[in-house]
Amino acid sequence: MSAAPEEGPRLVPAGAPDDPERHKSPRRGMCAAVLFLEAIALALTVPVIIRVSDVDPAVAVAVGGGLALACLVVSGLLRRPWGYTVGWVLQVGAVGLAVLVPAMLFLGGLFAGLWATADLLGRKIDRERGAAWQQYDAVDGA
C-alpha cells in the first residue's frame, strides 16, 4: 500500500482572510461548465445546419463554430464581471440559431435555462458564502 501524498506546507492558514479557498466562486465554476458543454453542443450543430438547412457550409462553420469557440473563450473570461454579460449574449445567439435549425429553439432554450440557473444560483451561493465568512471573522476576531 502506498501512502497518500502529503500536501506541501500551507503558506496561509486555512480560513485566513487571504486563503485562496475563500475566494473561489461556485458561480464561476457552474457557469464555465455550462459554457463548456454548450460549446460541444454548438460544434455538433454545424453538420446539422449543413444537412438540414440550405446553408453554405462556410456559413454554417462560421456561425456554429464561432459560437462554440466564443463559449470556450468566455468560459475563461468569467473572472471578470462583464464575462457573465457576454455569456447571456451567447445564450441569445444559441437560441437565435433556431432561424437555421428549428430544433435549436429547444436546445438553445435548454442551455439558456441552465445558464440562468447557474448564474442566479451561483450569485446566491456567493452572497451566502460571503456572509458566512463575515460571520466567521466576527466570531473568530472576538
Image (cartoon, rainbow, N blue to C red):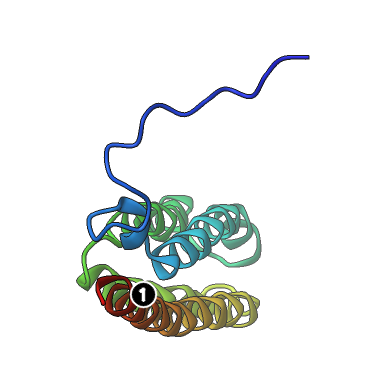
Image quadrant for the C terminus? Answer: bottom left
Query: Most extreme residue toward the front, as rendered?
Result: 142
Give the x, y percent position of residue 99: 50, 80
Q: Quadrant of residue 11?
A: top left
Q: Position of residue 81 (x, y in %)?
A: 22, 72
Q: Which residue is depicted at the point 53% across and 53% down?
A: 43
**Residue pushed farthest right?**
1
Image side of residue 44 versus residue 91, left or right: right
- The reply, left or right, for residue 81 in relation to residue 95 is left
Task: Please tell me whether mark 1 sits on a helix, a strand or a loop.
Answer: helix
Mark 1, Cα crowd under 10 Å, few <14 / some 14-19 / many 20+, is: few
Q: Which residue is mark 1?
A: 136
Q: Is residue 8 above or below residue 121?
A: above
Instruction: Indicate the quadrant where residue 46 lies.
Output: bottom right
Q: Nearer the viewer, residue 37 or 26?
A: 26
Q: Residue at x 47, y 29 (%)?
A: 7
Q: Residue 37: x and y, percent? A: 56, 58
Look at label 1 and name its amino acid.
Answer: Tyr
Q: Is residue 133 left or right of residue 106?
A: left
Q: Is residue 80 above or below residue 119?
A: above
* Residue located 50% across and 76% down the image: 118
Quadrant location of residue 105?
bottom right
In the picture, which quadrant includes the N terminus?
A: top right
Q: Nearer the viewer, residue 59 or 38?
A: 38
Which of the two residues, 20 or 120, is positioned nearer the viewer here? 20
- In the image, residue 141 lies at what x, y percent? 25, 72
